[in-house]
Image (cartoon, rainbow, N blue to C red):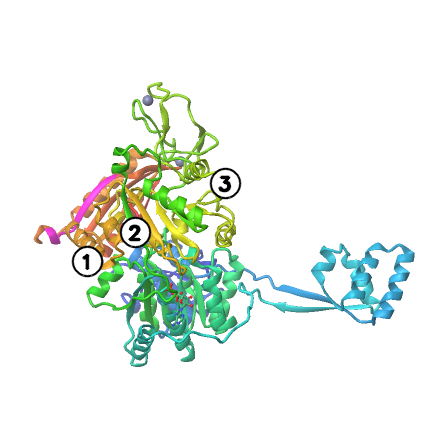
Amino acid sequence: MPELYADIIVDISHEKVDKAFQYRIPMHLQGKIETGMCVVVPFGAGNKQIKGYVVEVSERCKFDEARMKEICGITAKGVSAEERMIELAAFLRRNYGGTMIQALKTVLPAKQSVKMLEHRTIVRKMDREQIISLLGESIRKGQKAKERLLRELTEQENIPYEWITGKLGVSPATIRSLEGAGVIKIESERSFRNPVKLQDVCSHRNDLSPEQQEIVNHVMADYDGDNIGTYLIHGITGSGKTEVYLQLAEEMVSRGKQAVVLIPEIALTYQTLLRFYRRFGDRVSVMNSTLSPGEKYDQCRRAKAGEIDVIIGPRSALFTPFPDIGLIIMDEEHEGSYKSESAPKYHAREVAMEIARMHGAGVVLGSATPSLEAYHMAREGKCTLFKLTRRLTGGSLPRVNIVDLREELREGNRSIFSRKLQELLSDRLQSGHQSMLFLNRRGYAGFISCRACGEVMKCEHCDVSLSEHRDGSLVCHYCGYMVRKPQTCPKCGSKYIMGFKAGTEQIEQKLTEMYPGIRVLRMDGDTTKTKDSYEKILSAFANGEADVLVGTQMIVKGHDFPNVTLVGVLAADLSLGATDFRAGERTFQLLTQAAGRAGRGDRPGEVVIQTYQPEHYAVVHAGAQDYESFYEEEILYRELSGYPPVDHMLAVQLYGKYPDNLQKLAEELASYTGSMADNSQPLAKRLRVIGPAPASIAKINDIFRYVFYVKHEKYDKLVQVKDLLEHKIQIIQPRYESVQFDFDPMHIL
Ligand code: ADP
Ligand code: ZN
Ligand code: ZN
């Protein structure tokens, strides 16, 4: 039997996971030690026995064999937060690939010294008369700084320290001298920073509708009966899902449990947070990307210490080290941002279900347009489906017009606005209602190509088409590469070189030409670069500072604009065009959400969907707001072509500096994978390998990309494939190439 060794981390924190020590696994423990386990090891010169965590088991000895120490034993399986995190990391590594260190870094917060914010206040110790006489003295002596401070003290008894040193420009030395003379004292109050400022916690709450109450009762009865599972709430925006989440979280908290509420980052709006804040006061904490690592670390500390009951945040909030989770809620579960884009490429839905299993907790998914994955689970009986059918905010469903752009062209309309859209826009401008125009694309224009020879202007580093901006430059949206737009085609010299499809900037420009005096706000990747520009634009629009909001998909999410009665989708096809098996699903979601923006107030709304493919089922069913019919057609397509969620798919993504080497490695791994197929199985049940091929974006930042896909009906089988490939890669030890795994990918590479 070969010797086995284990890499062990003795201090489990985000920063220390790179520092593993290797120990020998003694004979009697061989076969029992696994990645993620907690063991006891001798440590340091005194060989003190301490706890450590196994992050890797291998046959390779990395250090001096003679001096290597042995593992003493396995600790009894406990349920400390650390052990759960290790277990979770092992789950991530096993199911999504990557290294144990990457997995650990995903679940552990970065430890950072949390700066204590000191709130210091200067308090007047003498009465006003005494201050006035001191003031007179300092005026006579020409002590300007002291004068400013004393003058302020005649008005107020307490002044924030920062205000005095900042606004009044009084030096700390001057403050100290007054303190020494007994004129003032400095009071300080130390506090951990809390990302949410305490608002008025208010006790008002809505009585749940019978539909809502039924969901709460059902889930809580399951929980109390030790029979909790996964639930899907299918309900349009405004049907009361969030109200149900609030109630469920409160029920859990009243049982001494904690709740995790996942919300896509973009939907973390002030209004939503306020509702949770009103309900849970400072027992709720918010995680978002603007938090510093120190604040995140502090949140984790507070969660572990039992100081908070509810956390709201994007997918990383899943890794809050709560002692006893009762419920994980995932709002807008269909959102692509729930899938991690770096290794381990996990999906929050699946990880939520694993965490729930570990804690004996439930998972509640909610969406107006459920993912095929979630709805498929419901159809298969793996989760309980609830429907919320009524819009509680009032307002009827909008009228949807589908406009065939080919028809417009035949009738001689070359504008980017169909006649129907123009007519409705004029009407809204006259009646003072607001409109939203939505385009699935940013920048002034789409790609630039030559009308004579068809040459497309591409980025030198990324193999994607460049986008034209108004200042005449061509920009790559992957790497930022920028060139001036050429006057003539670099290939054939023709001067007919121009952009095709319209971008948000061009729409804005066209609107101001067509409707003089129109007030337009634009929201896209370019206008929302700074942290709060997104909220600023939305609140300006909500305040009626513009007639039309033009934007990319950002504008279709969340947010109520009661005065919007017209929504135009300018080119529904742009998302259909993508060569991606989720294109239909994404288009349906986008169109449904966009339509949901119209008529949120008491006035009925209208929607115009412009498209070159009016007969496409995603367009037709979105127009009819009919999720189920869409699902039926979409799932049939997935079944026939063997795509998730019916079958599973593993993308093996290869990155490398040298295209030839990369291609060779891709071919070697793909053919090795092909050899795993069990040829005794009927073809349809066999493992299938697609590719390898250069990725659709073959190069980014001078790194070449190759990909091949492996399909099988069983997810576990693909996990096995991944394990074998990882092993193979370890043997090959490629020098300039790296490989990543993406299970059931959201995007094709
Ligand atoms: P969703 O999360 O599905 O978009 P919300 O929970 O935000 O729906 O509810 C939409 C609106 O209806 C909110 O303004 C909310 O305060 C209100 N609301 C929700 N449930 C009720 C209820 N049972 N009674 C009265 N108003 C409600
Ligand atoms: Zn040309
Ligand atoms: Zn580029």
Instruction: Write the residue at 69% across / 65% down.
Output: 120
Q: Amino acid at mark 2?
A: Val
Mark 3 Cα-neighbour bin, 10 Å: few <14, some 14–19, many ≥20: few
- In the picture of the structure, the residue carrying the numbered disc 1 is 714
| Amino acid on which the number 3 mark rests in the picture | Gly
Q: Quadrant of the C terminus?
A: top left
Q: Earlier in the sequence, mark 2 or mark 1?
A: 2
Q: CA distance from mark 2 to mark 3?
A: 28 Å
Q: Is residue 495 above or below residue 517?
A: above
Q: Is residue 664 above or below residue 336?
A: above
Residue 685 drawn in magenta: yes
Figure quadrant, ligand 1: bottom left
Does ligand 1 reach within 8 Å of label 2's beta carbon? no
Secondary structure of the residue carrying tag 2 is: strand
**Tag 1: Cα neighbours inside 10 Å, few (<14), some, or many (≥20)?**
some
Chain part drawn in magenta: 684-693
Element marked by disc 1: loop
Q: Residue at x 35, y 74 (%)?
A: 209
Q: Earlier in the sequence, mark 1 or mark 3?
A: 3
Residue 656 image-quadrant placement: top left
Q: Which mark is residue 517?
A: 3
